[in-house]
Image (cartoon, helix red, strand yellow):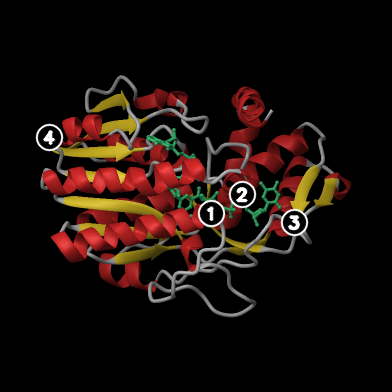
Amino acid sequence: MKKLLITGGAGFIGSHFIKYIIDNHPDYTVINVDNLTYAGNLDNLKSIESNERYSFIKTDICDAISINELMSQGIDYVINFAAESHVDRSIIDSSQFINTNVLGTNTLLEAAKTYGIKKFIQISTDEVYGSLGHEGVFTEESPLAPNSPYSASKASADLMVRSYYQTFGLPVNITRCSNNYGSHQLPEKLIPLMICNAYEDQSLPLYGTGLNIRDWIHVKDHCRAIFQVLCKGKNGEIYNVGANNERTNKDIVMSILRALNKTESLITLVEDRLGHDYRYAISYDKIREQVGWQPEIDFEEGLQEVIGWYLENMEWCKETRRRLKTYYKCIYG
Ligand code: NAD
Ligand code: DAU
């Protein structure tokens, strides 16, 4: 049995990844380390929580004593999903982004070095490259030019990961993925937020002109990419993960409105996000050539399937929104 330590496994992508491993790779055990912030929800893992190859430990990745204790137990691989992930929140207050995304990653790297971990994968983001104009795509050679406190904290973590490879020879990979969509995503992110609002006939707040562009990938394609990197990634390499699905935010919202049979009048153009990146687009040639991965899920079909999931799970959406509201009230008054 290979022992996999996953951090942030109660969040959106981490929980999909754990379910993917437990359901498809019987030669792996998974320890999920998550401190259950507002974004962590163990209900996301209901379908596998009693599987004997899965266990959960509530710990902060910044807690060096607990992390060292865990890694001393014969862990083979570490995949770091844990992060503060929401750009808007990093604009309100960046301190927790520095703690978790930078210092937490560093705590994991130190422990991984001490206990001779065979592979450390850092789950990063295309946002570390900054923003594109109308033309071009990000490659792994694109310079780092993060624009938000969130993306700056992720870029900082990437540089620490790189340094542990260069200085100590820690076997690392960094994956940089584009915008994910899928079930169980918090309705503070564009797609679930707009589905929930449209369902309740609330206004759909599009930032600025609504014409900013994101490059979308189904979370299940992202999970397969990470597993392929674990198996075949060359030590020290960075791999971009994308699926060539550029859409304006308005395109996305219009698709949601059509699927729910609601009118465009629900859209409200609101004040723009500070430092709002105009466009992301990612080349995934390198991961396709070196690792043999490519996306499989058609965007239009995937989006309809995911909209269907939210509509069938409106109770989950309502409960999650209640939790989010309570959280925001506690933190920001
Ligand atoms: P998420 O916010 O849904 O989940 C983050 C998880 O990390 C939560 O379960 C939370 O409880 C946990 N966590 C936060 N701080 C922690 C800490 N100090 N110790 C332990 N656990 C902690 O995030 P997500 O959307 O699933 O993103 C996962 C990773 O993928 C992040 O690193 C993010 O930067 C990256 N990423 C996300 C996307 C996307 O579109 N969502 C795209 C590319 C990369
Ligand atoms: O590109 C990968 C990144 O994608 C990840 O690293 C981040 O963790 C993840 O949160 C996501 O960041 P974005 O900022 O792109 O995602 P978000 O869903 O917040 O916004 C997507 C776009 O929609 C962005 O252009 C802002 C816009 N938007 C968002 C919200 C929440 C709106 O117009 N209105 C909104 O209410």
| Residue corresponding to mark 1 | 149
Instruction: Count the marks.
Output: 4
- Tag 4: residue type? Ser
Label 1: few (<14), some (14–19) or many (≥20) C-alpha neighbours in 10 Å? many
| Residue 138 position in % (x across, y down) | 48, 73
User: Residue, x 17% and y 63% (percent of image)?
Assistant: 167
| Residue corresponding to mark 4 | 72
| Nearest to the observer: residue 164 or residue 227 | 164
Q: Earlier in the sequence, mark 3 or mark 4?
A: 4
| Residue 36 position in % (x across, y down) | 43, 28
| Nearest to the observer: residue 65 or residue 33 | 65
Which quadrant of the view contains residue 169?
Answer: bottom left
Q: Earlier in the sequence, mark 3 or mark 1?
A: 1
Which quadrant of the render holds ligand 1? top left
Which quadrant of the view contains residue 289?
Answer: bottom left
Mark 2 near mark 1, Cβ–Cβ under 8 Å?
A: yes
| Residue 44 position in % (x across, y down) | 45, 29
Extreme residue toward the bottom, this view: 135
- Tag 3: residue type? Asp
Q: Earlier in the sequence, mark 1 or mark 4?
A: 4
| Residue 6 position in % (x across, y down) | 30, 39
Q: What's the distance in space between the residues labelled 1 and 4, CA to CA? A: 33 Å
Q: What's the distance in space between the residues labelled 3 and 2, CA to CA? A: 12 Å
- Say which of marks 2 and 4 sits in front: 2
- The quarter in which the N terminus is drawn is top left
| Residue corresponding to mark 3 | 272
The reply to whether residue 304 is in sight is: yes
| Residue corresponding to mark 2 | 91
Q: Is residue 63 left or right of residue 72?
A: right
